[in-house]
Amino acid sequence: MSNSVRPQETGRLAEQMTARILQSKGFSLVTSNFSVPDIGEIDLVMIRDQTLLIIEVKARRKNSNYGGAEQAITQRKIMRIRRTAAVFCRRYGFINDPVCFAASLVSINQAGKMTGLEWVPF
């Protein structure tokens, strides 16, 4: 991955990596990039044993000028994700299912390889 790679591509790569790791642990992908205008977006919705996992994926390349991925998970962002998840659950019939929220903080090197992944529940 060169310095010319756009942040959206880095984010998409991190989402794909996160989904693959969770699928290897028995989760199924329900949807990705679910958005509600004027409310927010959810990067990944996964499910295992009737429990939804709502995931915010943040990726940073090693030499990023944006700070660490964990700095991007603000209280405001968490509130927007939770509101969006409520809409998702109502819309698709997951109202009575347990829901967990987590951030997947992915570190990616210049070659496009994942060098680290940290799970942060919220």
Image (cartoon, rainbow, N blue to C red):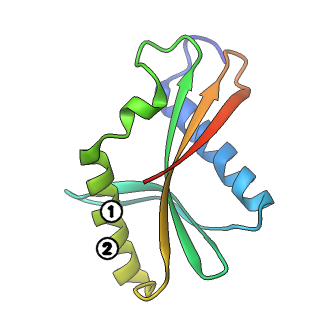
- Indicate left or right for 48 with 86 as reference: right
Residue at the spot of label 1: 82
Label located before the other in sequence (1 or 2): 1
Q: Residues within 10 Å of mark 1 (few under 14, many from 20)?
A: some
Q: Which mark is residue 25?
A: none
**Picture layout, residue 114 above or below residue 100:** above
Indicate the amino acid at tag 2.
Val
- Residue 19 locus on image (x, y percent): 66, 53
Going 53% across and 32% down the picture, which residue do you hit? 59
Foreground residue, 29 or 100? 100
Residue at the spot of label 2: 87
Q: Secondary structure at mark 2?
A: helix
Q: Residues within 10 Å of mark 2 (few under 14, many from 20)?
A: some
Quarter holding the C terminus is bottom left
Going 57% across and 20% down the picture, which residue do you hit? 61
Foreground residue, 117 or 42? 117
Foreground residue, 39 or 25? 25
**Picture layout, residue 119 above or below residue 86:** above
Quarter holding the N terminus is top right
Q: Give the quarter of the image for residue 82.
A: bottom left
Q: Nearer the viewer, mark 1 or mark 2?
A: 1
Going 30% across and 47% down the picture, which residue do you hit? 77
Q: Residue furthest left?
A: 38
Q: Secondary structure at mark 1?
A: helix
Q: CA distance from mark 1 to mark 2?
A: 9 Å
- Indicate left or right for 51 with 40 as reference: right
Indicate the amino acid at tag 1.
Arg
- Residue 20 locus on image (x, y percent): 73, 52
